[in-house]
Amino acid sequence: MFKGFRVGSIAGIPIKLDITLLLILPVLAYLIGNGMGEVVNALNVGLDAGIDAAALSQGMVPWGLGLASAIGLFVCVLLHELGHAAVARRYGYEIESITLWLLGGLARTVEQPRRWNHELWIALAGPIVSVAVGVGCFLAFDAVPSDPARFVLGYLAALNVVLAGFNMIPAFPLDGGRVLRALLGRTRTRAAATERAVSIGKFFAIVLGLFGVLVFNPFLVAVAFFVYIAAAAEGRQTAIEATFEGVRVGDVMTPAAQIRTVEPTHSLADVLDRMFRERHTGYPVLDDGRLVGIVTLDDIRDVDPDSRAMVTVGETMSTDLETIASDTEAMDAMRRIGSGDVGRLPVVDDAGSLVGLVTRSDLVTAMNVIRERRSVGDVAMSSE
């Protein structure tokens, strides 16, 4: 979810589009075009627009304006997310990407804000930008004489204010929910603040979902479902971060002395025999104790079986390695394994020598042990 495909970058931030956005755009354009009369009437009453509804309802005009408004809406969502990203960068947080999808946008940071005031202003930045864009659209709306342009600008002016207001609902993970967590974080740990914000977010999601069912609005039901699922996922992520607080890769890795390795001069046939005997599908490749690559079963499969006895590991191993240092936080290793197509990370020192290996299994086992130790400690304290 939220991976999308890259379409460009702004200020060095990758901009991605999720496939769901391409699916919703024509639907949204149709809904806007189909409701042209109602929208024009609302603009004429609310903004004294004086737009000729009959002129905008002829031929393909409604559908063209619907598409322009739909695209404009997602441009406004992008500006909203860039507001989050700009403030996050101001506080020194790296932005991984901005993804536009079915229900809006998502600015993903490499790490979560650690200080409550950082999260507060990062969360507020998006709605502030939306209000500013809405005001800008309203000023442009007053300045242009063309009815089609006034329709699009008036529609976006109103919708940006609605977007800002909706995002400030204290339902985690909406911006309002993040503001709530930031304020709770003034007197609580991040884990405790997240737990409370997630509970409130789930409550609002249930209420919103029930309301959507009562008024037969599938969009509200979809938003409620997203809020509930995203809140639960954020709660789990924060619980993992709390578990690994203060734990380093060196604390959970498998030491180099316990790791089976091969050398670049070994033949693929010999390595394949070892894989069968030792039930391994990959080995770090060491040359005089220095990590130079990794050879896997997939690498061997690419070589003709009749040639494997004559082909060496050094000729087929993967040298584009993703490594990690032993003093890196264990949570960072968890993120890198979870976000990348890797099941293990070699741990190396400054000289490039292998000192260990950390796998997803190592991290999960360590997490379970830490939780068990802490739960035993809590029980012991409660019995005193």
Image (cartoon, rainbow, N blue to C red):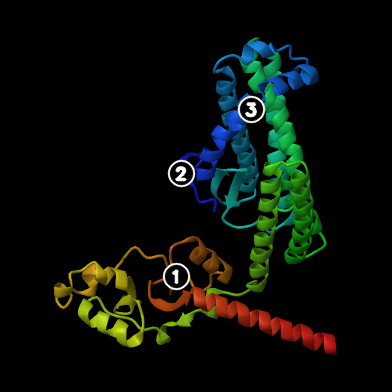
- The answer to whether residue 372 shows anywhere in this view is yes
Q: Nearer the viewer, residue 282 or 82?
A: 282
How far separated are the C-alphas under marks 3 and 2? 27 Å
Q: Position of residue 86 (x, y in %)?
A: 62, 42
**112 to the left or right of 185:** left
How far separated are the C-alphas under marks 1 and 3? 46 Å
Q: Position of residue 208 (x, y in %)?
A: 76, 48
**161 to the left or right of 11:** right
Q: Residues within 10 Å of mark 1 (few under 14, many from 20)?
A: few
Circle 1/circle 3 CB separation < 8 Å: no
Give the residue drawn at x 60%, y 52%.
93
Question: From the viewer's perspective, is residue 332 above or below residue 23?
Answer: below
Q: Which mark is residue 343?
A: 1
Q: Which one is closest to the eye, mark 3 or mark 2?
A: 3
Q: Which one is closest to the eye, mark 1 or mark 3?
A: 3
Q: Nearer the viewer, residue 368 or 93?
A: 368
Upstream in sequence: badge 1 or badge 3: 3
Q: Position of residue 272 (x, y in %)?
A: 26, 80
Q: Which mark is residue 191?
A: none
Question: From the viewer's perspective, is residue 97 above or below residue 326?
Answer: above
Q: Amino acid at mark 3?
A: Ile
Q: Which mark is residue 6?
A: 2
Name the outermost residue toward the right. Answer: 384
Question: From the viewer's perspective, is residue 251 above or below residue 158?
Answer: below
How far separated are the C-alphas under marks 2 and 1? 25 Å
Q: Residues within 10 Å of mark 3 (few under 14, many from 20)?
A: many
Residue that numbered label 3 is attached to: 32
Q: Amino acid at mark 1?
A: Gly
Q: Amino acid at mark 2?
A: Arg
Secondary structure found at label 2 = strand
Q: Nearer the viewer, residue 186 or 214?
A: 214
Q: Which image quadrant: the C terminus? A: bottom right
